[in-house]
Image: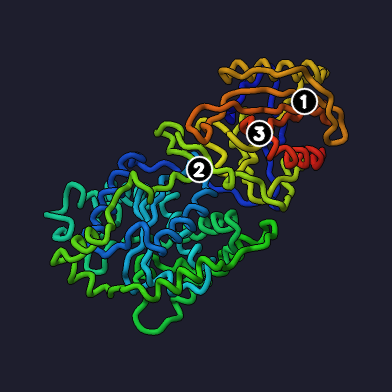
Amino acid sequence: MLRRTLLCWAMVLCPATESYSATTAPQFPDPGKPSMSRENQRALGLKAAAEVYKQMPVLPDNSPETQYVRQLGEKLAATIPAQYSWPFEFHVVAQKEINAFALPGGPMFVNIGTITASDNEAELAGVLAHEMSHVYMQHSAKQAGKAQTTGLIAGIAGAVLGGAVGGMAGELGQMGINMGAQGLMLKYSRSDESQADAVGAIILYKAGYNPQAMADFFKKLESEGGSPPQWLSDHPNPGNRQQAIQKEIKDWPPKEYASDSPAFQATRQHAMGVKAYTAQEIAQGAKSGEWAALNQKNGASFNPAGSNTIHATSPTPNEPATKASVALESVLPGRKMVAANLGRVKISHPDNWQVTVPHKQGNFVTIAPPAGVTDKGVGYGVLLSGIAPRQGQSVNIDEVTSALIKDMQQNNNGLQQVGGSRPITAGGAEGRSVVLQSRSPFPAANGQPQAERDLLVTVPGRDGSVIFMIFVAPETDFPRFEPTYDAMLKSLKFR
């Protein structure tokens, strides 16, 4: 199990970790830290989600629509860095109007009318990615912080949530969450919308969808006659949405985007035959308790610890490491390789693996599938960094390699060297490779701990620095990844 930090031993990291070309794939921004804790956001979101099941008709988890939306949501959630992720949940509301909303902490709801209004999978993915971005940026919690600072409390239907504004209702109101005749609604600012568009574009891009599909769907809603969909009332247009997204993505590496799938079209067709209700009908049914009874009858119960919970790439930072084994399909490298410019070096990597650049010296660049990284370490992928000697000192590759191993063993309990150092050629230079072994952060399929192979490769640069890479995978899976790791080594170039 290798953490993404390493103590600097009388040396400094080379600028390979300090720059990242604009021609590489986009990186997720730091969402910041609102005054409300993650635990409180999650708790309030779950309470609000439970209210939705009382006030709206929700499809059961085994419905084709819910199953499909969950699969699509899981694909999108897997792109989010582990340290910023949330335990996303996906639910479908049997409402005709076009709408979707995400609650603090991860519960998400999409109206069946949104599924039928989407022309293809990319458009629906755009709606989900946009909503997930509000959770990612913690907009509701930041809204609460503003309310607490100014003393303003957003309007909330106390009769629906039970009693006067206060307790949960008051806290939700401060987060801009309103449960009224139109169902559960969240109020966002135009600045929030711009941020959600930008982060949603990154999610779509990394999941293999054209980010423009998100703007196209929203534009289609705006062009409809009559009263605007509820989604547009909750999500004000920040202005020049299409142009802003085009500007955001213009320098990103080109991709072959997916736009549709047979699964989406089959789900959309099935959704057209599902009984759905208008907002007015839902409001009337909420008063009589109709939906709570119907949901119970249909087996649509709210169970955040059940099968409708997706922990994206890892638990939240305050939760223990994941106890579930990772599905091999979610971490296997794609067939297409793309180049990443990392300051002094350039290296190719699978296009479905994410490059994460550290914010400070002492940390690794990580090239890994999102599902292969947890808050405890990297279980699948590559860690890359570099060291430079002090001024006037020369570097001996064997001494550097030995010192690196010693330092890694001091900071990774249980890390063992397997065999001796071997010569290897990479980037036009002769380096060294050493096989190490540790414990994987992911258990085996039977739930038991499993060994991990960590292949350390050190390569001297032209300027006297040393680039080192650690190729990681469980011992039993390593042969499946070895051809990709070999290709990455062969692609290494010094700049």
Comparing marks 2 and 3, which lies closer to the viewer? Answer: 2
Location of mark 3 (residue): 383
Q: Of the residues shown, which amino acid type is indicated by label 2?
A: Thr
Question: Distance from label 1 to label 3 (Cα)?
Answer: 14 Å
Which residue does the image show at 30% across and 48% down from the upper left?
A: 303
Q: Where is residue 247? Give x, y as percent.
A: 61, 63
325 left or right of 320?
right
Relative to 325, residue 458 above or below: above
**What kind of element bears circle 3?**
strand
Residue 433, which numbered label?
Answer: 1
Picture quarter with the C terminus: top right
Measure how far apart labels 2 and 3 are at the Cα level: 17 Å
User: Label 2: few (<14), some or many (≥20) within 10 Å?
Assistant: many
Residue type at tag 3: Leu
Of callouts 1 and 3, the N-terminal one: 3
Label 2 secondary element: loop
- Residue 399 placement: quadrant: top right
Closer to the chain start, of discs 2 and 1, is 2
Disc 3 residue crowd, few under 14, some 14–19, many 20+, Cα 10 Å: many
**Residue 313 circle label:** 2
Task: Specify the farthest residue to the front.
Answer: 446
Image point 31% across, 73% down: which residue?
276
> Which numbered tag is attached to residue 309?
none
Sooner in the amino-acid sequence: mark 2 or mark 3 = 2
Residue 343 position by quadrant: top right
Can I make out residue 101 in this image? no
Image location (x, y in percent) of residue 317: 44, 35
| Count of marks overlaid on the render | 3
